[in-house]
Image (spheres, rainbow, N blue to C red):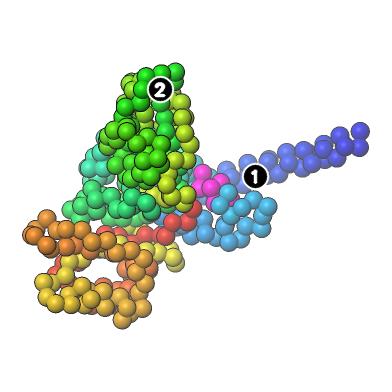
Amino acid sequence: MGMDKELRQHRDAIDAIDDEMLKLINDRARHAQTIGAIKGGGLVYRPEREAQILRRVKENNPGPLSGESVAKLFREIMSACLALEKPLKVAFLGPEGTFTQAAAVKHFGHAAHTDACASIDDVFRNVEAGTADYGVVPVENSTGGAVGTTLDLLLETPLKVCGEVDLRVHQFLLRKPGATANLVKVYSHAQSLAQCHEWLNQNLPGVERIPVVSNAKAAKLASEDETAAAIASEAAAEVYGLDKVAENIEDEPNNTTRFLVIAAHDAAPSGNDKTSLVLSSKNLPGAVYELLAPLAHHGVSMSKLESRPSRTGLWEYLFFIDIEGHHQDEKVAQALAELREKAAFVKILGSYPAAVL
């Protein structure tokens, strides 16, 4: 009976805490509604404000829950509160079950309305047309490298980058349940095929690898063909009713994909930001060195440099660069002003909070 009494005490305490949490969460929601009314028709979602909140709760978290777990809980609370003001429509590279959808949910929470698009181009078009408030697109993978389509569209679009999402990626080999036919082909996105290249060489050396527009599309094709398999996510297995034949087949154990959030606006300074830009150098000796010198001169750290052939002429290159800091920060603004004098072309793609989760 002593143990029952002790358990009852703890359960009663949990019930009281749950009641208090329920009250506080709804108090928070009412404040969010009031802020929405004060802003009128202004922006509902402020990426810099959410990033500041998530950083604060992680830093102030006393445990025993991990900082990441606490931040995930607060993400969902903020997502639900935002939906009271205006449910956000978020376009992503579909169909259902892609890693891009998982990244969209990770960043915006489950209360956002995620809309599947057939291609990365369609994500950009929907956001430009205003049929979606935001878009989420893959930009690079730690194993497979840059996503060229996204880089090309960032150059061409008037949209801005307002956020980033880092997603740990686990790949699964999926097949139709009960399939007994010989496996002759594997469908997947080109990036995922690259991420599993060595595993495929060792385990399926004679099987044709067929790149398709998304992993979810690969899962759909595998669900219709007993001779096919797909490399896709666990979520895709559930959506399309496939068996997981092999798990975690990515070659790199820390395989991570980075996604960008695009919108008609970027973000205000949050205190821990990145700025993405694209440059081209003048056709002179030492031009690339001169291109990067302003960053070093003003003490601006560069976290990424990706070269890509320009479509305007043979052997001309564009440089996609990520730097630490916001374009409104004094030293970043000074470096950008000097860059504009030295570069043949400069476009700021956006400033945004560094990924928190």
Residue farthest along the bottom direction in this orientation: 297
Query: Which dot marks residue 21?
Result: 1
Where is residue 88? Give x, y as percent.
38, 42
Where is residue 256? Give x, y as percent.
42, 50
Q: CA distance from mark 2 to mark 1?
A: 44 Å
Residue 176 as seen in the image, left or right of residue 116? right
Looking at the picture, does residue 187 appear above or below residue 28?
A: above
Question: Magenta region: which residues?
Answer: 70-76
Looking at the picture, does residue 42 appear above or below residue 229?
A: below
Where is residue 114? Give x, y as percent.
37, 37
State whether residue 350 appears in this view.
yes
**At 32% across and 78% down in the image, what residue appears?**
296
**At 23% across and 61% down in the image, what residue appears?**
307
Residue farthest along the right direction in this orientation: 1
Q: Is residue 95 magenta?
A: no
Secondary structure beneath dot 2 equals: loop
Q: Amino acid at mark 1?
A: Met
**At 37% across and 39% down in the image, what residue appears?**
200
Q: Which residue is mark 2?
A: 176
**At 44% across and 36% down in the image, what residue appears?**
172
- 45 and 171: which is toward the camera: 171
Residue 268 as seen in the image, left or right of residue 34? left
Q: Amino acid at mark 2?
A: Lys
- 112 and 94: which is toward the camera: 94
Where is residue 12? Give x, y as percent.
78, 39
Please identify the quarter of the rendering in which residue 174 is found. Answer: top left
- 25 and 350: which is toward the camera: 350
Looking at the picture, does residue 39 appear above or below residue 218?
A: below
Categorize mark 2 by other alpha carbons within 10 Å: few (<14), some (14-19), many (20+): many
Which circle's residue, 2 or 1, is located before the other in the chain? 1
Q: Is residue 75 magenta?
A: yes
* Quarter in which the N terminus is drawn: top right
